[in-house]
Amino acid sequence: MEGALAIGAGLAVAVGALGGGIGQGIAGGKCFESIARQPEIADQVRTLLFITLAFIETLTIYGLLIAFMLVGKIG
Amino acid sequence: MIFASSYEPLFHIGPVPVYDHIVAQWLVIILLGTVAYLATKNMQTIPRGLQNTFEAIVEGCFNFFGGALGNEHAAKKWAPLLVTFFLFILTNNYFGLIPGAGTIHGFVPSTADWNITATLATIVFFVVIIAGGKNFLAHLFTPHWLFLPLNLLEQVARPLSLTLRLFGNIFGHEMIVAFLVLMAPFLVPMPLVALGVLTGLIQALVFTILATSYMADVVGEGH
């Protein structure tokens, strides 16, 4: 049972971080593209990027919280 | 650790238990209040020193969040609250970076407790309803009354995601630093603590920007 909990905790972070990482990579890359094309809108794009990254990161953070809960159950 | 009930209260006021995070919040309120009092005690037309710094911070935040609201009347009314959110969360986040934090009672980032972030998110929830008024009800029925269940679900999901985002980021950061300190007490956790400066600022900013955009949804374009 404890082994399953440990594997679950690891998977929660791993899978969550995988999706979030891909998403943030795409968002960041597109942001750099648009700034390189139109440097004068860099400020607006940066603000939007931070909000977007925060949204994506939330999903990963959900996974992290689940992992912490599962680890708490093991001890 | 995730739930406040799993650790001991610091002391009791009557039947009410008082936890570390509450004391940390009091400290933040006293700190911000004292600085604000000192900055405005002896106000001058041409600001100098502390007054100048404080005016720059408050005016910058005010213009940023007020501009994001997009409605001048609403901005005058609600931007003070948003700026307060920002400064309060920022100071709370940075409380964990003070040397001695975590070992001395009361010196904890109180946003690492989900009760506190849930409180902030609940305030945002009700403020959006109050700020919107009739517009809020109309907003529930856009673009068509068929969307009512979806819109209601969105309203419920907002405070939940606001709570968990702020709490998860600060709590996760605290836990990672704690693990690293256990494994290698010297120098190794330093880059992560430095990252905490960035995380604290971004999370305070994101919470407030989201609250602003929720509010901007319902206050309308203005007159």
Image (tube, rainbow, N blue to C red):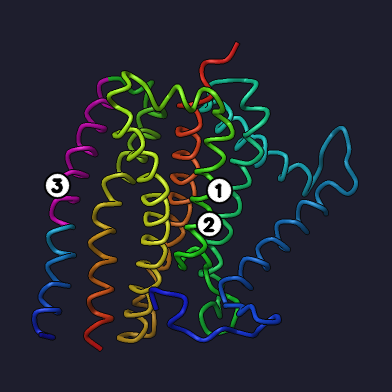
Estimate the x, y position of residue B136 in percent, counting from the top left.
49, 28
Under mark 3, the amino acid is: Ile
Instruction: Look at 10% across and 85% down and name the residue there.
Output: A1
Can residue B188 be seen in this snapshot? yes
Distance of mark 1 from mark 2, alpha carbons?
A: 6 Å
Estimate the x, y position of residue A63 in percent, counting from the top left.
22, 61
Distance of mark 2 from mark 3, alpha carbons?
A: 32 Å
Identify the residue under disc 3: A22
Mark 3 nearby-residue class (10 Å; few <14, some 14–19, many ≥20): few
Identify the residue under disc 1: B123
Q: Are marks 1 and 3 in contact (CB under 8 Å)?
A: no
Instruction: Look at 51% across and 19% down and name the residue there.
Output: B220
Say which of B65 and B194 sits in front: B65
- Asked which secondary structure carries label 1, the reply is helix
Estimate the x, y position of residue B159 in percent, counting from the top left.
42, 48
Horizontal arrangement in the rendering, residue B166 relative to residue B88 (left or right): left
Highlighted magenta segment, given as a residue range: A17-37
Q: Are marks 2 and 3 in contact (CB under 8 Å)?
A: no
Please report, as a chain letter, where disc 2 is located. Answer: B
Q: Which numbered mark, 1 or 3, is in the foreground of this view?
A: 1
Under mark 1, the amino acid is: Ile
Q: Quadrant of residue A39?
A: top left
Name the quadrant of the C terminus of chain B: top right
Distance of mark 1 from mark 3, alpha carbons?
A: 33 Å
Please report, as a chain letter, where disc 1 is located. Answer: B
Q: Quadrant of residue B145?
A: top left
Say which of B67 and B114 sits in front: B114
Instruction: Look at 83% across and 54% down and name the residue there.
Output: B38
Name the mark on residue B119.
2
Q: Are marks 1 and 2 in contact (CB under 8 Å)?
A: yes
Mark 2 nearby-residue class (10 Å; few <14, some 14–19, many ≥20): few
